[in-house]
Image (tube, rainbow, N blue to C red):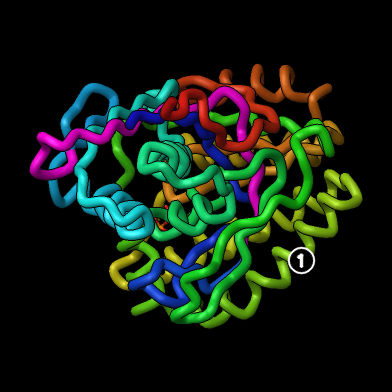
Amino acid sequence: MRATAVACANIAFAKYWGKADPWLNIPAVPSISLTLRGLETVTTVELDPALEHDEITIDGELISPPESKRAVELLDAVRACAQSRCFAKVLSRNNFPKASGLASSASGFAALSVAARAAYGLPFDPVESSRLARRGSASAARSLFGGYVELPQGLPGDDSLAARPLYPPEHWELRLVVAIVCEQPKKMGSRPAMEQTRASSPYYAAWLEHAPKLAQRVREAIAKRDIEALGHASEASFQAMHAAAWAAEPSIFYLEPASVEALHTIRSMREKEGIPVFATMDAGPQVKAICLPEHAEAIAQRLSNTKGVLRVLITQPGPAASLIESPS
Ligand code: DP6
């Protein structure tokens, strides 16, 4: 039994940061993202009765515990559902380099959840796969769907939480221009950083209160295809998230000097040249510019000429996760 699935990365306009339930990995705030065409993970899951444990290879590298723990837990959940005890070989490949600073965990867990269910003979069910992927990495729950996607906040113990599609990619032809400023692995993963923010940031409570309002503004802006409203709400979301993390003790600070330069480039294009372009950032130093297709090339040009920016990528709305090979 063998199945292969593909899933795309996503970037959030309204950020998820903080958990209502750390054991079930349930977000404490709603998040809204765009799935991105071309930034893909392709994953094959093949059952092998001769194996004594799962064997997971990512980009040619065999992964062992503790790195493989979340993927093995996902496979355990699928096995429980399929009433199987057979271990599997997992081969996963990202078409964007791990060091590019773009999270591969979202597309990775999304592709794994689709391929694993199919390999174990379970029907294709994006909602169920989204729920499974959420346990691996909550942002991954959103990569099951194409275009504009929401992962609502959840309640402790509510393991049914999954993402839901808001609008297909064609709803709005936005572009996200990614400025890569650092290719080293990030300083601190989202999971421990969220926990450190919860445990010690004086602004964490304010973030929890404010984030749903920002998500509502993002939702309305996407519905109306209003770039100004989306841009301002998205900037407010990443800034509040980073501010809460920055105020933690020890402080979590993801910006590099070149991130600050790129943020200035974006702000200057907006304020001095009247181009509707807005920034967002995740748990790392890369800066992403949110803009309309007609401005993407000029923004990419300016960002690549910004001090410290290594490369830029222009990304666009992408499709849902899908099966590309199912067991015959
Ligand atoms: C800043 O989904 O990587 O990118 O659920 O602990 O695996 P875990 O966290 P993860 O966090 C993503 C955080 C973010 C914002 C976002 O994508 O919404």
> What's the amino acid at mark 1?
Gln
Q: Is residue 257 visible?
A: no
Count of numbered badges drawn on the protein: 1
Relative side of 184 to 293, left or right: left
- Crowding around mark 1 (Cα neighbors within 10 Å: few <14, some 14 to 19, many 20+) is some
Residue shown at 19% from the left, 33% from the top: 48
Quadrant position of the N terminus in the picture: top left
Q: Position of residue 29 (x, y in %)?
A: 58, 70
Q: Is residue 42 magenta?
A: yes
Residues in magenta, as a range: 31-54
Q: Is residue 178 visible?
A: yes
Residue 179: give x, y in percent of width and height.
54, 29
At a point 60% along the width and 57% down the height, the residue shown is: 163
Q: Residue at x 13, y 42 (%)?
A: 64
Disc 1 designates what residue?
216
Residue in front for this viewpoint, 53 or 213? 53
Q: Based on the displayed image, in which of its 4 quarters is residue 61 positioned?
A: top left
The relative height of residue 158 versus residue 137 in the rendered view (above or below) is below
> Does residue 111 show up magenta in the picture?
no
Looking at the picture, tell me which residue is in the foreground, 311 or 95: 95
